[in-house]
Image: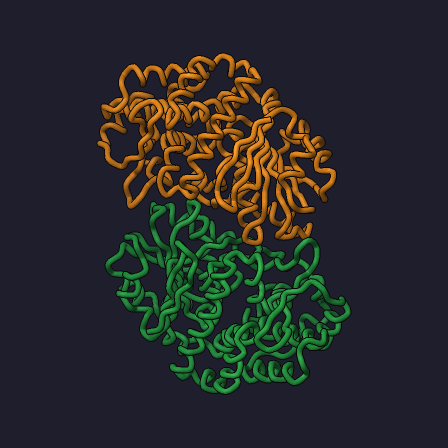
Chain colours: A orange, B green
Amino acid sequence: MKEVKVNLGNRSYPIYIGSDLIANTQAYENLIKTDQVLVVTDSNIEPMYLTGVLKALNSFDADSYILPPGEDQKNLTNLNNIITELLTRRFSRTGCLVALGGGVVGDLTGFVAACYQRGIQFLQVPTTLLAQVDSSVGGKTAVNHPMGKNMIGAFHQPCGVLADVGVLKSLPDREYKAGIAEVIKYGLIRDPEFFVWLEDNIDALLELQPQALEYAIERSCINKAQVVAEDETEKGVRAILNLGHTFGHAIETGLEYSSWLHGEAVGLGMTMASYMSHLMGWLSEEDHGRIVKLIQRAGLPDKLPTQLQDVDLRELMSVDKKVSHGRLKLVLLKSIGEAVVTDTFDEDVIARTINTYR
Amino acid sequence: MKEVKVNLGNRSYPIYIGSDLIANTQAYENLIKTDQVLVVTDSNIEPMYLTGVLKALNSFDADSYILPPGEDQKNLTNLNNIITELLTRRFSRTGCLVALGGGVVGDLTGFVAACYQRGIQFLQVPTTLLAQVDSSVGGKTAVNHPMGKNMIGAFHQPCGVLADVGVLKSLPDREYKAGIAEVIKYGLIRDPEFFVWLEDNIDALLELQPQALEYAIERSCINKAQVVAEDETEKGVRAILNLGHTFGHAIETGLEYSSWLHGEAVGLGMTMASYMSHLMGWLSEEDHGRIVKLIQRAGLPDKLPTQLQDVDLRELMSVDKKVSHGRLKLVLLKSIGEAVVTDTFDEDVIARTINTYR
């Protein structure tokens, strides 16, 4: 088992990465310092893992709450429903939630933990690659608003993360590949050696070779943990983690959070950010080509969905959280391994970028 | 003008206390460091003060959002409605909300500020005595859940508080007296000299004599600021600020947040906590009598409402946030000026206390 530490003073916590962690009693007992536990999961995950998790939580007063699956469940109604459940159970401020699932379950459960009685503990047990390398680490929690993704949320750190690589075998192919997009992101924004490693090992990752997978998750989490430790609440450098996300969120909003996975939108968003960085004269044509190729080899989309042919993506980008003092901020690349956050660019360059990927 | 500082490291902020502050341009310009401002208020406050506030905010890009009045507006639906408004206006993460109103407006607006895009700035402009001495200071924000008050919320500090004593003249008599309950609380929990001052000056306060009022607000805010600085997120000593609140919240929940004001429920709650402290052998009969007398002189209720004759108040107390590991915690008094948080008491003593006030 590997362990990566997220260093945030008295909010520090470990990420455990390994096999068979999800049903490992010791792991839970290390990380949960209370009696009362509620596992929140969805009806896709439940038949696969819930029994094992509850068995591992045998020494706690543990129960579960099952959500329907899907991004559209990440809303205030479910927040309210889970809080009703907690109040019905007399769940106390010292209790601990366990988020067993992908990013939707993690973000929603984390936000419930942030709000319930002004904040209780929670443990992340991510069951998708995307959640293991990205959304479960760093304390971003939120629900969606019909007008924008993650618009209602909080920074609330978990008390730990259990990333079990074994569960990824049961992940649908598309979801797995969507997770690879966020792995590639770490190479692009701050780890050029890791990018080269990914160029050499993308096939091993796509075949789910355990060693490659553990290495990729560990290296991703180390990168994420370092950025989060530097800038927990995204006043500065943390924004580079949003590479591809402003284009990506506009795509997801345009599709009303359906049909494309978050990682797929981010994958194309990174390709678009790469192209825009090339148009700005920062990224060489060759490096842009390497990025496009790696993202394509990962099986991620390389064109905007046909439903968005006539949608004003630029308009949708304006409601993104990265807008500051009325100016849109974008994460772009100076080179492979060096990201920059900028609000200085010609509108024409965005328009050309969007049109190129229609 | 008096100024009290809340010392919380990089989240420190000033409380300004004085006359004509609500329309003072300089005060807003000192405290708001952004262009974009949305004033949230309710339709009772709007005709009295909104025009003046917006005029004072002339140098900002400021607009307003009007809520219906009342405690039942402090809910997730209004949170969502205000966020819809913010998104429609393209309100950015660097914008600032202004909460112009009593505790309901302050708590709801503060929670919107805590959640919108994971946290933006807000300024408290409390227009009730209760909000000036209590709810606007210390960063507790929340909305209610049908099963319990303030069950969904966050600790989110404002960037400043403007307490204008002039606005209290327009406060209905009952609301003003409800605020006195929280003023008395500071004397009871940690400031015996202030309690004596209140015994000597309660009539001046009830007549709204400006000097007495400014002194009482300043002294209340100093007490609150010290407690909050010691324990921002209520892991320990901050809980003493809840004197009378567990009984009080049970009353409010039983009445479904209608007919009694929060301060009225807290006033009777303090009387009940005082009686229970006396039954426990801590508070002398004489001191309990002084407390009862001061709370009565302030015009606060001294009996449970008739609607709650047959309601199980003990049951309602169990869903209070002060429950820890299944044990109810109560704030009681060792003496006037010394509060203690305890989960060690006979159920019989609670039952006798509740029955005495039926």
The spot of residue A21 in percent (x, y) is 64, 29
Position of residue B230 relative to residue B193, above or below, is above
The spot of residue A102 in percent (x, y) is 56, 31
Q: Is residue B340 left or right of residue B126?
A: right
Q: Is residue A65 left or right of residue B43?
A: right
The spot of residue A34 in percent (x, y) is 66, 46
Position of residue B340 relative to residue B95, above or below, is below
The spot of residue A224 in percent (x, y) is 45, 32
Q: Is residue A95 visible?
A: yes
Q: Quadrant of residue A333?
A: top left
Quadrant assignment for the C terminus of chain A: top left
Nearer to me, B179 or B85: B179
Residue at image coords 55%, 33%: A15
Residue at image coords 61%, 63%: B256
Quadrant assignment for the N terminus of chain A: top right
Nearer to me, B238 or A85: B238
Residue at image coords 48%, 65%: B135
Q: In the orientation shown, which residue stands out farthest toward the right?
A: B348
Q: Is residue B174 visible?
A: no
Residue at image coords 58%, 63%: B239
Nearer to me, A7 or B80: A7
**How many circles with numbers are drawn on the protein?**
0
Position of residue A101 relative to residue A234, above or below, is above
Position of residue B33 relative to residue A182, above or below, is below
